[in-house]
Image (spheres, rainbow, N blue to C red):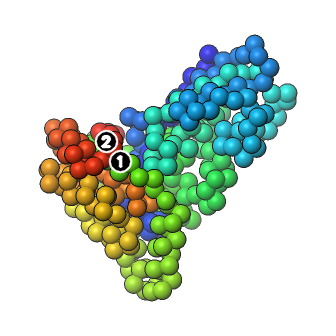
Amino acid sequence: MTKSSAPGKIILFGEHAVVYGRPALAVPVVQVHADVEIQDSSRAGIWIEASDVNLHAELNTLPSDHPLASVLHNFFFLLRVSPFPNLEIKIHSTIPVASGLGSGAAVTVALTRALASHLNYLITDEQINAFAYEIEKLYHGTPSGIDNTVVTYARPVYFARGQPMEIFKVGQRFTIVIGDTGLSAPTKESVGDVRKLWTADQQKWESVFDQVGRIAAQARTMIENGRWKMLGELMNKNHSLLQEMTVSSPELDQLVEAARNTGALGAKLSGGGRGGNMIALIESERAESVATSLRAAGAKNTIITQVL
């Protein structure tokens, strides 16, 4: 049996402005992950069990554009594997789907690593990352590349469109709490609405995006230098700018306010907005109390994670 795992991810700074060329900063979340087990099968075909999404099927019965089918077909094409081997594949993920935590990329990376190992194919992280990005393109059109890179390397990433992705080091570990509104995050809709605002007044919104970009750049410097407590004020400023972009929501604002009232150093929405997650920067000893206050304020789930 071959096993592999890949973490989730969360955006700390820069969402939406990243679409307009400003930098964004994202980190892995190892507390949630996708796990894959592969073993040879006595049955003909490739049998996939993903109980989290109620999937129990043989590969050939899945539509060609099914995410898991795409990974398998493209991987075997890449390796020129023919005929396909008989396999049993089990997939389990604790990453909520459509929540901005990189669920799709994590499954792709874990499955790709497991397949390569099971077939004794040597594959580098760079190759896995490139392959996962191509899979992301099938379903997201023009993805930033943040999800697959953070998930592949399990390291913090600094990204600006049109520039090489940069993996950077954390000077001193710090703790964040993630609060899930339980609402699906319609990223395409929120990105489209921001585009309408930008089209109507480009000068104004370019200035707003510049502010977000400066916040992301400052945050990277503070993280690298171990001055993580100073991130709280940047989070609060970033959230205000996201509110101005109309991508927050009453549910997100309520969780952000609850976190701040319970002693968080700062808090903001994370990802596309209008649902999904928010994050709060906390001193580690306050983690449980902030998580409790978030659940009392309506969070359907909370995750306490350290950025390393």
Q: Position of residue 296 (x, y in %)?
A: 21, 45
Q: Residue at x 85, y 27 (%)?
A: 83
Q: Residues within 10 Å of mark 1 (few under 14, many from 20)?
A: many
* Residue most extreme to the top: 42
Q: Residue at x 44, y 68 (%)?
A: 17
Residue 120, located in which quarter of the rendered image?
top right
Amino acid type of disc 2? Thr
Q: Position of residue 195 (x, y in %)?
A: 50, 75
Residue 140, located in which quarter of the rendered image?
bottom right
Q: Secondary structure at mark 1?
A: strand
**One can see residue 66 in this view:** yes
Amino acid type of disc 1? Asp
Q: Position of residue 210 (x, y in %)?
A: 39, 74
Q: Alpha-carbon distance for marks 1 and 2? A: 6 Å
Residue contact between numbered discs 1 and 2, judged by CB atoms under 8 Å: yes
- Residue holding disc 1: 180
Q: Residues within 10 Å of mark 2 (few under 14, many from 20)?
A: many
Front-most of 39 and 156?
Answer: 39
Q: Residue at x 45, y 56 (%)?
A: 185
In what quadrant of the picture does the C terminus appear?
Answer: top left
Label count reads 2
- Residue holding disc 2: 302
- Pick whichever of labels 1 and 2 is earlier in the sequence: 1
**One can see residue 167 in this view:** no
